[in-house]
Amino acid sequence: GAGVSQSPSNKVTEKGKDVELRCDPISGHTALYWYRQRLGQGLEFLIYFQGNSAPDKSGLPSDRFSAERTGESVSTLTIQRTQQEDSAVYLCASSLAGWSYNEQFFGPGTRLTVL
Amino acid sequence: GENVEQHPSTLSVQEGDSAVIKCTYSDSASNYFPWYKQELGKGPQLIIDIRSNVGEKKDQRIAVTLNKTAKHFSLHITETQPEDSAVYFCAAIDQAGTALIFGKGTTLSVSS
């Protein structure tokens, strides 16, 4: 079956521009997560959705970052006024339910480069 | 909050040798510890996980051990093969029981 998909796969933008990153989770997965992976680093948790609600936004690094989810399906991560330190791979994952023991399935990521 | 330390950052072994990667965590309430493998250009993929009510779990050539008292867990790969070459991440569930907190990763290189 189809896995988690993300688009675009690569995004190059200029400092100060806004970007939108899209995630399509596995059908039927109620939980959705966004992570950021800087070069040579581990994954940094950004935000978690249960259905269309985000009970945990604790990882968003600044108010320039926001995310939404609609139809308990697709999610969009928006970064406003991008900065060079935002350059990273942004990974989306989904799981059947948002609690311990549920395997998180990851998409291939979107590589964001801010010039 | 939870903090996960992972070492070594790089590991090179000969084909057929064993590889061991170790992680420590800080939150004694954490109860789920997955290991992910990430190949170049791909998202991480779960390879094995362990819950806090067991001390060891094995799946063919890979095994994970957990010591809750010491708050550390390890990944063991036996009879390594070139296709095992990848970046491996350990993780622990956060206090809310939802998000994963990842270690910084170990780059494993298996040479034939």
Image: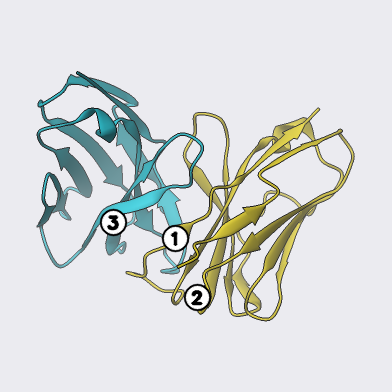
Given the image, on which type of amino acid does mark 1 rest? Phe
Q: Nearer the viewer, mark 1 or mark 3?
A: 1
Q: Which chain is yellow?
A: A
Give a yes or no on whether discs 2 and 1 share a subunit.
Answer: yes
Is label 3 in a helix, a strand or a loop? strand
Give a yes or no on whether discs 1 and 3 share a subunit.
Answer: no
Name the residue beneath numbered marker 1: A105
Name the residue beneath numbered marker 3: B33
Q: Chain of mark 3?
A: B
Q: Residues within 10 Å of mark 3 (few under 14, many from 20)?
A: many
C-alpha gap between disc 1 and disc 3: 15 Å
Given the image, on which type of amino acid does mark 3 rest? Phe
**Residue A88 position by quadrant:** top right
Q: Is residue B1 left or right of residue B107?
A: right
Circles 3, 2 touching at the beta carbon (< 8 Å): no
Q: Position of residue B100 (x, y in %)?
A: 43, 57
Residue A16 against residue B100 in the figure, above or below: above
Q: Which one is in front, A14 or A84? A: A14
Residue B77 against residue A40 in the figure, above or below: below
Given the image, on which type of amino acid does mark 2 rest? His
What tint does the image give chain B? cyan
Name the residue beneath numbered marker 2: A29
**Residue A89 position by quadrant:** top right
Q: Residues within 10 Å of mark 2 (few under 14, many from 20)?
A: some
